[in-house]
Amino acid sequence: MFVQKQSISLQLSIKYMGQKKLLKFEAIGNYPNVLQYPENMQGKWKDFFENDNSLVLELACGKGEYSVNLGRENKSTNYLGVDIKGNRIYTGAKTALAEGLNNVAFMRTHIGKLTEYFEKDEVAEIWIIFPDPFLRESRAKNRLTHPRFLHLYQQILKDGGRINLKTDSKELYDFTLETIAEQNCTIHENIADIYGKGKATGPLAIQTYYEKMHLAEGRTIYFVSFSLPSTPIKLPVRFQNHEAAD
């Protein structure tokens, strides 16, 4: 009987979670600051935000905590959180609307399709906050600092536009540094331990839900800020076999 009650309780919990997710999807469908797989947006972001301010992206934004916090501090810059999961976007979008942050918006789509939404020089800066590090070598191509993604960023970023990575993954951090060196990128800031070196100031002081958990577990937080070279991003030989197999 106890096992049966546990099973029923679990089923009800799953059903409730599913209903909440559906309600969130329904809500963002009516939010003016959320776009889902939009069409014909290239070159039109200034029209969307109704100003000529610079546009900054937060990729794999989750709940959009960085977009919201950066938007609070910098009203003269537009921030767009990008993620595929609408139930996560809901949180940031709801907060931005409640606070009247007209410079913060969200887009639901695949990051691999960025060039369908932005023109060259339309994006000033990119933030990548605690992304999935995809630790298995066979999935390295999914890392958001992999050369195939840098190639996409190069097509939408302004010359010299920064890419900012904040992560608790030493593996992703090391991989990114290796990629930066291979591609002749320019490093603007490289911090192997943000908190240990007292560098958690300004934008780096923003803590997401996951960062708070990582810190509670005693993990080290890494940060690197870099810009892409003027020459085209190339796929290193070590990855070419992986791409050919797809």
Image (spheres, rainbow, N blue to C red):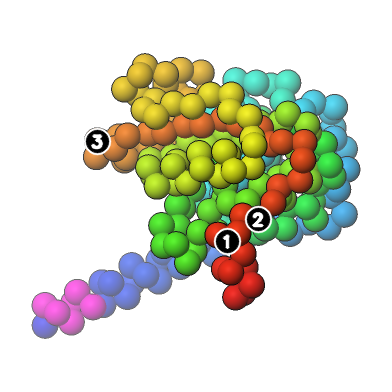
Give the residues in magenta. 2-7
Mark found first going from the N terminus, 1 or 3: 3
- Magenta run includes residue 5: yes
Q: Looking at the rendering, in which quadrant would you find the C terminus?
A: bottom right
What residue do we see at 84% from left, 49% from top?
A: 41
The image position of residue 149, as x and y in percent, is 65, 51
Return the mark for residue 218.
3
Q: Is residue 96 visible?
A: no
What residue do we see at 49% from left, 64% from top?
A: 139
Q: What element carries label 2?
A: loop
From mark 1 to mark 3, how far is it between C-alphas? 33 Å
Q: Nearer the viewer, residue 93 or 192?
A: 192
Identify the residue position indicated by label 2 in the image: 235
The image position of residue 222, as x and y in percent, is 41, 33
What residue do we see at 42% from left, 21% from top?
A: 200
Q: What element carries label 1?
A: helix
Identify the amino acid type marked 2.
Leu
23 up-or-down from 216: above or below: below
